[in-house]
Protein backbone atom coordinates (compact mmCIF):
# COMPACT_ATOMS: atom_id res chain seq x y z
CA UNK A 1 0.00 0.00 0.00
CA UNK A 2 1.15 3.47 -0.77
CA UNK A 3 -0.83 6.12 1.18
CA UNK A 4 2.41 8.10 1.67
CA UNK A 5 2.46 11.56 0.19
CA UNK A 6 4.97 11.28 -2.65
CA UNK A 7 5.17 14.95 -3.54
CA UNK A 8 4.86 14.33 -7.29
CA UNK A 9 1.16 15.06 -7.74
CA UNK A 10 0.44 17.68 -10.38
CA UNK A 11 -3.26 18.31 -10.03
CA UNK A 12 -4.29 16.15 -12.99
CA UNK A 13 -7.89 15.99 -11.72
CA UNK A 14 -8.20 19.64 -10.76
CA UNK A 15 -11.68 20.20 -9.27
CA UNK A 16 -13.17 17.08 -10.87
CA UNK A 17 -15.90 15.46 -8.80
CA UNK A 18 -15.25 11.72 -8.72
CA UNK A 19 -17.41 8.95 -7.26
CA UNK A 20 -15.53 5.75 -6.39
CA UNK A 21 -17.46 2.64 -5.35
CA UNK A 22 -15.71 0.14 -3.10
CA UNK A 23 -13.52 2.97 -1.77
CA UNK A 24 -13.23 1.37 1.66
CA UNK A 25 -10.56 -1.14 0.68
CA UNK A 26 -7.91 -2.24 -1.81
CA UNK A 27 -7.88 -0.66 -5.27
CA UNK A 28 -10.77 1.71 -4.49
CA UNK A 29 -9.13 3.04 -1.33
CA UNK A 30 -5.75 3.60 -2.98
CA UNK A 31 -7.46 5.30 -5.92
CA UNK A 32 -9.54 7.60 -3.72
CA UNK A 33 -6.43 8.82 -1.91
CA UNK A 34 -4.36 9.31 -5.07
CA UNK A 35 -7.23 11.08 -6.86
CA UNK A 36 -7.70 13.51 -3.96
CA UNK A 37 -3.98 14.32 -4.08
CA UNK A 38 -4.48 15.07 -7.78
CA UNK A 39 -7.09 17.69 -6.92
CA UNK A 40 -10.31 15.66 -7.17
CA UNK A 41 -13.25 16.00 -4.81
CA UNK A 42 -13.86 12.37 -3.97
CA UNK A 43 -17.07 10.62 -2.98
CA UNK A 44 -15.93 7.46 -1.16
CA UNK A 45 -18.74 4.93 -1.35
CA UNK A 46 -18.84 1.43 0.08
CA UNK A 47 -21.35 -0.85 1.70
CA UNK A 48 -19.01 -0.92 4.66
CA UNK A 49 -19.81 2.49 6.13
CA UNK A 50 -16.83 2.46 8.54
CA UNK A 51 -14.17 1.75 5.91
CA UNK A 52 -15.66 4.31 3.51
CA UNK A 53 -15.46 6.81 6.34
CA UNK A 54 -11.86 5.85 7.12
CA UNK A 55 -10.80 6.53 3.54
CA UNK A 56 -12.58 9.91 3.52
CA UNK A 57 -10.88 10.76 6.83
CA UNK A 58 -7.41 9.91 5.47
CA UNK A 59 -8.12 12.29 2.58
CA UNK A 60 -9.47 15.09 4.78
CA UNK A 61 -6.51 14.73 7.16
CA UNK A 62 -4.28 15.54 4.19
CA UNK A 63 -6.28 18.74 3.70
CA UNK A 64 -8.08 17.41 0.60
CA UNK A 65 -11.80 17.03 -0.21
CA UNK A 66 -13.88 13.91 0.40
CA UNK A 67 -17.21 12.68 1.71
CA UNK A 68 -18.33 9.12 2.36
CA UNK A 69 -21.63 7.44 1.48
CA UNK A 70 -22.92 4.01 2.46
CA UNK A 71 -24.06 2.21 -0.70
CA UNK A 72 -24.96 -1.27 -1.77
CA UNK A 73 -24.31 -1.04 -5.52
CA UNK A 74 -26.82 -3.80 -6.25
CA UNK A 75 -29.59 -1.54 -4.95
CA UNK A 76 -30.95 1.19 -7.27
CA UNK A 77 -32.15 3.45 -4.42
CA UNK A 78 -28.63 3.40 -2.92
CA UNK A 79 -27.02 4.28 -6.25
CA UNK A 80 -29.56 7.05 -6.81
CA UNK A 81 -28.88 8.42 -3.31
CA UNK A 82 -25.09 8.27 -3.90
CA UNK A 83 -25.33 10.45 -7.01
CA UNK A 84 -27.86 12.81 -5.39
CA UNK A 85 -25.53 13.27 -2.40
CA UNK A 86 -22.61 13.87 -4.75
CA UNK A 87 -24.46 16.62 -6.58
CA UNK A 88 -25.88 18.21 -3.43
CA UNK A 89 -22.39 18.33 -1.84
CA UNK A 90 -20.22 19.23 -4.81
CA UNK A 91 -22.67 20.61 -7.40
CA UNK A 92 -21.89 18.13 -10.19
CA UNK A 93 -20.57 14.72 -11.21
CA UNK A 94 -17.57 14.39 -13.55
CA UNK A 95 -16.30 10.84 -13.16
CA UNK A 96 -17.57 7.56 -11.72
CA UNK A 97 -15.26 4.63 -11.03
CA UNK A 98 -17.47 1.54 -10.79
CA UNK A 99 -14.97 -0.46 -8.77
CA UNK A 100 -16.82 -2.35 -6.01
CA UNK A 101 -16.92 -6.08 -6.60
CA UNK A 102 -16.85 -9.46 -4.90
CA UNK A 103 -15.11 -12.75 -5.69
CA UNK A 104 -16.55 -16.27 -6.00
CA UNK A 105 -13.54 -18.10 -4.54
CA UNK A 106 -12.92 -19.97 -7.83
CA UNK A 107 -16.20 -21.92 -7.47
CA UNK A 108 -16.76 -24.14 -10.51
CA UNK A 109 -20.03 -24.61 -12.40
CA UNK A 110 -21.14 -27.57 -10.27
CA UNK A 111 -20.05 -25.95 -7.03
CA UNK A 112 -22.00 -22.75 -7.70
CA UNK A 113 -25.51 -22.58 -6.28
CA UNK A 114 -28.12 -20.00 -7.19
CA UNK A 115 -27.42 -17.92 -4.08
CA UNK A 116 -23.73 -17.42 -4.98
CA UNK A 117 -24.55 -16.83 -8.66
CA UNK A 118 -27.14 -14.16 -7.79
CA UNK A 119 -24.90 -12.46 -5.25
CA UNK A 120 -21.95 -12.18 -7.65
CA UNK A 121 -24.01 -11.18 -10.68
CA UNK A 122 -26.08 -8.67 -8.68
CA UNK A 123 -22.93 -6.98 -7.39
CA UNK A 124 -20.43 -7.27 -10.23
CA UNK A 125 -22.81 -6.91 -13.17
CA UNK A 126 -26.09 -5.32 -12.07
CA UNK A 127 -24.14 -2.95 -9.82
CA UNK A 128 -22.12 -1.73 -12.81
CA UNK A 129 -25.28 -1.40 -14.93
CA UNK A 130 -26.87 0.74 -12.19
CA UNK A 131 -23.70 2.83 -11.78
CA UNK A 132 -23.49 3.50 -15.53
CA UNK A 133 -27.20 4.24 -15.87
CA UNK A 134 -27.40 6.73 -12.99
CA UNK A 135 -24.18 8.47 -14.04
CA UNK A 136 -25.37 8.85 -17.64
CA UNK A 137 -28.68 10.31 -16.41
CA UNK A 138 -26.72 12.90 -14.44
CA UNK A 139 -24.31 13.74 -17.27
CA UNK A 140 -27.22 14.30 -19.67
CA UNK A 141 -29.05 16.44 -17.09
CA UNK A 142 -25.90 18.52 -16.56
CA UNK A 143 -25.41 18.70 -20.32
CA UNK A 144 -21.72 18.13 -19.62
CA UNK A 145 -19.00 15.73 -20.63
CA UNK A 146 -18.88 12.65 -18.47
CA UNK A 147 -16.47 9.85 -17.76
CA UNK A 148 -17.22 6.30 -16.61
CA UNK A 149 -14.55 3.74 -15.75
CA UNK A 150 -15.56 0.19 -14.94
CA UNK A 151 -13.22 -2.12 -13.08
CA UNK A 152 -13.32 -5.44 -14.94
CA UNK A 153 -10.58 -8.10 -14.65
CA UNK A 154 -8.35 -10.50 -16.53
CA UNK A 155 -11.35 -12.76 -15.81
CA UNK A 156 -13.18 -10.61 -18.39
CA UNK A 157 -10.85 -11.89 -21.10
CA UNK A 158 -10.75 -15.63 -20.56
CA UNK A 159 -11.22 -18.47 -18.12
CA UNK A 160 -9.49 -19.58 -14.93
CA UNK A 161 -8.84 -16.26 -13.20
CA UNK A 162 -12.05 -16.80 -11.22
CA UNK A 163 -14.91 -19.24 -10.98
CA UNK A 164 -18.06 -19.41 -13.13
CA UNK A 165 -20.00 -16.51 -11.64
CA UNK A 166 -17.03 -14.13 -11.33
CA UNK A 167 -15.82 -14.85 -14.89
CA UNK A 168 -19.35 -14.46 -16.29
CA UNK A 169 -19.95 -11.20 -14.43
CA UNK A 170 -16.63 -9.71 -15.49
CA UNK A 171 -17.16 -10.68 -19.16
CA UNK A 172 -20.46 -8.80 -18.88
CA UNK A 173 -18.70 -5.68 -17.61
CA UNK A 174 -16.83 -5.44 -20.92
CA UNK A 175 -20.14 -5.72 -22.79
CA UNK A 176 -21.75 -2.93 -20.77
CA UNK A 177 -18.67 -0.76 -21.23
CA UNK A 178 -18.63 -1.07 -25.03
CA UNK A 179 -22.39 -0.67 -25.39
CA UNK A 180 -22.69 2.45 -23.22
CA UNK A 181 -19.59 3.97 -24.84
CA UNK A 182 -21.18 3.66 -28.30
CA UNK A 183 -24.64 4.82 -27.19
CA UNK A 184 -23.38 8.08 -25.63
CA UNK A 185 -20.13 8.95 -27.45
CA UNK A 186 -21.78 11.83 -29.31
CA UNK A 187 -22.94 13.28 -25.98
CA UNK A 188 -19.34 13.67 -24.77
CA UNK A 189 -19.52 10.71 -22.42
CA UNK A 190 -16.50 8.39 -22.35
CA UNK A 191 -16.75 4.84 -21.00
CA UNK A 192 -13.79 2.52 -20.51
CA UNK A 193 -12.90 -0.58 -18.53
CA UNK A 194 -9.68 -1.72 -16.94
CA UNK A 195 -8.66 -5.34 -16.55
CA UNK A 196 -6.39 -5.84 -13.56
CA UNK A 197 -4.49 -9.11 -13.12
CA UNK A 198 -3.55 -10.40 -9.68
CA UNK A 199 -3.27 -7.32 -7.49
CA UNK A 200 -1.87 -8.16 -4.08
CA UNK A 201 -2.82 -7.13 -0.56
CA UNK A 202 -6.45 -6.16 -1.18
CA UNK A 203 -9.44 -7.46 0.72
CA UNK A 204 -10.11 -9.78 -2.22
CA UNK A 205 -6.60 -11.22 -2.66
CA UNK A 206 -5.11 -11.20 0.83
CA UNK A 207 -6.71 -14.58 1.69
CA UNK A 208 -4.98 -16.16 -1.35
CA UNK A 209 -1.51 -14.68 -1.04
CA UNK A 210 -0.08 -17.54 1.02
CA UNK A 211 -1.73 -20.18 -1.20
CA UNK A 212 0.96 -22.21 -3.01
CA UNK A 213 -1.32 -23.04 -5.99
CA UNK A 214 -2.16 -19.38 -6.57
CA UNK A 215 1.49 -18.41 -6.20
CA UNK A 216 2.27 -21.00 -8.93
CA UNK A 217 -0.30 -19.36 -11.25
CA UNK A 218 1.17 -15.92 -10.59
CA UNK A 219 4.74 -17.03 -11.24
CA UNK A 220 3.97 -19.26 -14.25
CA UNK A 221 1.19 -17.34 -16.05
CA UNK A 222 2.25 -13.77 -15.43
CA UNK A 223 5.31 -12.81 -17.50
CA UNK A 224 6.33 -10.25 -14.89
CA UNK A 225 6.07 -13.08 -12.38
CA UNK A 226 4.68 -11.08 -9.46
CA UNK A 227 1.51 -9.62 -7.96
CA UNK A 228 0.58 -6.11 -9.06
CA UNK A 229 0.35 -3.25 -6.58
CA UNK A 230 -2.80 -1.24 -5.96
CA UNK A 231 -1.06 1.99 -6.97
CA UNK A 232 -0.21 0.45 -10.37
CA UNK A 233 -3.96 0.09 -10.97
CA UNK A 234 -4.73 3.56 -9.56
CA UNK A 235 -2.22 5.13 -11.95
CA UNK A 236 -4.08 3.67 -14.95
CA UNK A 237 -7.39 4.85 -13.51
CA UNK A 238 -5.85 8.29 -13.05
CA UNK A 239 -4.90 8.45 -16.72
CA UNK A 240 -8.39 7.38 -17.82
CA UNK A 241 -10.09 9.80 -15.41
CA UNK A 242 -7.98 12.72 -16.60
CA UNK A 243 -8.34 14.73 -19.78
CA UNK A 244 -5.07 13.14 -21.01
CA UNK A 245 -7.21 10.24 -22.30
CA UNK A 246 -9.76 12.43 -24.11
CA UNK A 247 -9.87 10.32 -27.33
CA UNK A 248 -10.16 6.98 -25.56
CA UNK A 249 -13.58 5.34 -25.19
CA UNK A 250 -15.15 1.89 -25.47
CA UNK A 251 -11.96 0.04 -24.66
CA UNK A 252 -10.58 -2.15 -21.92
CA UNK A 253 -6.99 -1.78 -20.85
CA UNK A 254 -5.10 -4.54 -19.09
CA UNK A 255 -2.93 -3.87 -16.06
CA UNK A 256 -1.80 -7.44 -15.51
CA UNK A 257 1.98 -7.78 -15.85
CA UNK A 258 1.40 -9.38 -19.28
CA UNK A 259 -0.94 -12.20 -18.06
CA UNK A 260 -3.34 -12.06 -21.04
CA UNK A 261 -0.68 -11.19 -23.67
N1 LIG B 1 -7.34 -7.54 -6.49
C1 LIG B 1 -7.30 -8.17 -7.65
O1 LIG B 1 -6.44 -9.02 -7.91
C2 LIG B 1 -8.31 -7.82 -8.71
C3 LIG B 1 -8.08 -8.32 -10.00
C4 LIG B 1 -9.00 -8.01 -11.00
C5 LIG B 1 -10.10 -7.24 -10.72
N2 LIG B 1 -10.29 -6.78 -9.45
C6 LIG B 1 -11.49 -5.99 -9.22
O2 LIG B 1 -11.14 -4.80 -8.56
C7 LIG B 1 -12.24 -4.34 -7.78
C8 LIG B 1 -11.75 -4.01 -6.39
O3 LIG B 1 -11.23 -5.19 -5.80
P1 LIG B 1 -10.19 -5.21 -4.60
O4 LIG B 1 -9.20 -6.28 -4.93
O5 LIG B 1 -9.72 -3.86 -4.29
O6 LIG B 1 -11.12 -5.81 -3.45
P2 LIG B 1 -11.49 -5.32 -1.97
O7 LIG B 1 -12.28 -6.42 -1.39
O8 LIG B 1 -10.26 -4.87 -1.26
O9 LIG B 1 -12.41 -4.04 -2.24
C9 LIG B 1 -13.72 -4.17 -2.70
C10 LIG B 1 -14.61 -3.18 -1.94
O10 LIG B 1 -15.92 -3.25 -2.52
C11 LIG B 1 -16.85 -3.20 -1.46
N3 LIG B 1 -18.11 -3.83 -1.90
C12 LIG B 1 -18.33 -5.14 -2.16
N4 LIG B 1 -19.61 -5.33 -2.53
C13 LIG B 1 -20.22 -4.11 -2.49
C14 LIG B 1 -21.53 -3.66 -2.75
N5 LIG B 1 -22.51 -4.50 -3.10
N6 LIG B 1 -21.78 -2.34 -2.64
C15 LIG B 1 -20.81 -1.47 -2.27
N7 LIG B 1 -19.55 -1.85 -1.99
C16 LIG B 1 -19.26 -3.16 -2.09
C17 LIG B 1 -16.20 -3.94 -0.30
O11 LIG B 1 -16.77 -3.58 0.96
C18 LIG B 1 -14.75 -3.51 -0.45
O12 LIG B 1 -14.49 -2.35 0.32
C19 LIG B 1 -13.28 -5.47 -7.84
O13 LIG B 1 -14.27 -5.14 -8.79
C20 LIG B 1 -12.49 -6.66 -8.30
O14 LIG B 1 -13.28 -7.60 -8.97
C21 LIG B 1 -9.43 -7.05 -8.44
Image: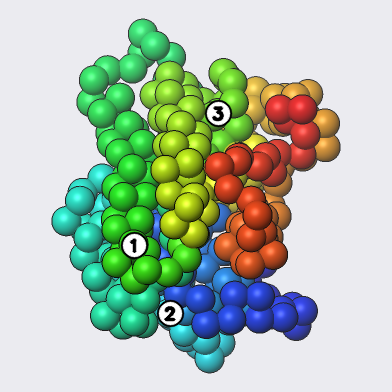
Cα gap from disc 1 to disc 2, whole angstroms: 24 Å
Identify the residue position indicated by label 3 in the image. 155
Q: Residue furthest right?
A: 224
Instruction: Please tell me which residue is depicted at 26% across the width and 28% down the height of the picture.
Output: 118
Q: Earlier in the sequence, mark 3 or mark 1?
A: 1
Q: Residue furthest front?
A: 186
Determine whether 27 is above or below 154 in the image.
Answer: below
Identify the residue position indicated by label 1 in the image. 140
Rendered location of residue 109, percent (x, y): 39, 11
Quadrant in which the C terminus appears: top right
Rendered location of residue 110, percent (x, y): 36, 8
Instruction: Please tell me which residue is depicted at 53% across the width and 91% down the height of the picture.
Output: 63
Quarter-of-image position of residue 68: bottom left
Rendered location of residue 81, percent (x, y): 21, 65
Badge 3: few (under 14), some or many (20 or more) residues near its Cα, within 10 Å? many
Determine whether 10 is above or below 172 in the image.
Answer: below
Helix, strand or loop status at disc 3: helix
The foreground one among 258 and 171 is 171
Identify the residue position indicated by label 2 in the image. 66
Whether label 3 lies within 8 Å of ligand 1 gets the answer yes
Amino acid sequence: MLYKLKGDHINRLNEKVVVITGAGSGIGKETAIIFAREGAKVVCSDYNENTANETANIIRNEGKEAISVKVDISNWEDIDNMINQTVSNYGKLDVIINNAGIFDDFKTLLDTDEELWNRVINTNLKGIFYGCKRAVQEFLKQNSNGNIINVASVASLGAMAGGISYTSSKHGVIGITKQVACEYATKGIRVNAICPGGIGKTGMTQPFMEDKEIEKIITSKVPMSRWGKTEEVSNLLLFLASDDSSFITGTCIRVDGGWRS
